[in-house]
Amino acid sequence: MPLEIIRNDITKVHADAIVNAANSSLLGGGGVDGAIHRAAGPELLAECRNLGGCKAGNAKMTKAYNLPAKYIIHTVGPVWYDGKRNEEKLLADCYRNALALAKDYNLESIAFPLISSGTFGYPKDRALKTAISVIGDFLLSNDMTVYLVVFDKISFTLSEKLFSSITQYIDDKYIEELPVDRYNQFEQRHIDFYPEEPMFSSREVLAPVIKRKRSLIDVVKNLDETFSQRLLRLIDEKGMTDSETYKKANIDRKLFSKIRKDIYYKPSKHTAIAFAIALGLNQDETKDLLLKAGFALSHSSKFDIIIQYFIDNGNYNIFEINGALFAFGQHLLGV
């Protein structure tokens, strides 16, 4: 699980290290900083007194004491003024330096709060964009599980433009599911009046609700290539490596290894879509890959519509997509 966005109290997260959004003195304060010091106990303050403070953008490590983590990485985020005082670079440095420190210590997991988005006043949508960008870049060349910890939904905000755009796309595309009994009544009425005329494409729209009956011949025709075989062929055709693919898909290396070894591997829908995103597949290619796993995209699923929104807009950054899915209360890709 390379990057997972979770809603939790960071002092309760089990990880090799948690990140403290500290002030420059490192002696505790309000918000996340104060909560971590209270939960860790007085020994943390005693150790921090010997660190000589910390400059904005830098990071320093201590033990975690009473916390479930092994270490605390303290980093000082920028105070937001107007966006013209190097705030974005300093915030990015916080994530880069904390990740670099975790890598130097050979840590396998690290949990971040949304740095500077509290009392330091950094706009939450901009803070989120920087966090996802830096963490995403790091994970493309490193193996580590990274958690972005959000205490409540208010703490997690997409840009108004993106949120509105996705909302409008959902409104335009979303179709309420027709209950099975009502659909059956409609279908029977159609057959009674038009026995020679096939039903229109409502079955395609309702694919997740009503499974289309297919003949044995149809089924056999579609057994020419399994999901695993199609995936591996697409990776070769795109000129990508295995590691590049599973990292862009936000998929664990061990899971990818299972898929490669088992040509009949049955992935979850979220895993199949994660690979489609990693490979930069268009709508038709994505639907074809999903079909190999026994799935389809539907306009009666908000999750599916959000995925289609990003594909339509040519945005295949899985970390940004997961940010949007989280904001809309949907299951994340690859985790």
Image (cartoon, rainbow, N blue to C red):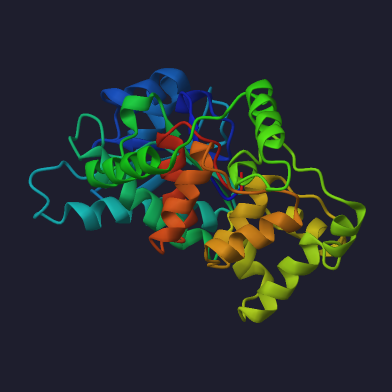
> Taking 35 as reference, is 5 above or below it?
below
The answer to which of 139 and 218 lies nearer the viewer is 218
User: Residue at the location (66% across, 50% down)?
Assistant: 271
Is 54 left, or right, of 66 in this rendering? left
**Residue 223 position within the rendered picture, expressed as x and y whole percent measured from the top left:** 86, 62
Q: In front: 207, or 315?
A: 207
Answer with the quarter of the image where residue 281 lies: bottom right
Q: How many marks?
A: 0
The image quadrant of residue 188 is: top right
Where residue 298 appears, x then y in whole percent?
A: 57, 44
Residue found at x 67% / y 55%: 290
Compared to residue 219, the image places residue 242 above or below, namely below
Residue at image position (72%, 66%) is 231
Instruction: Give x and y (percent) for residue 22.
Output: 30, 35
Query: Compared with residue 133, is residue 151 higher up or lower down, i.e. above or below?
Result: above
Residue 218 found in image quarter: bottom right
The residue lying toward the viewer, choosing from 42 and 162, is 162
In percent of width and height, residue 307 lies at 49, 50
Query: Residue at 68% across / 73% down in the picture?
Result: 234
Residue 80 appears in the figure: yes
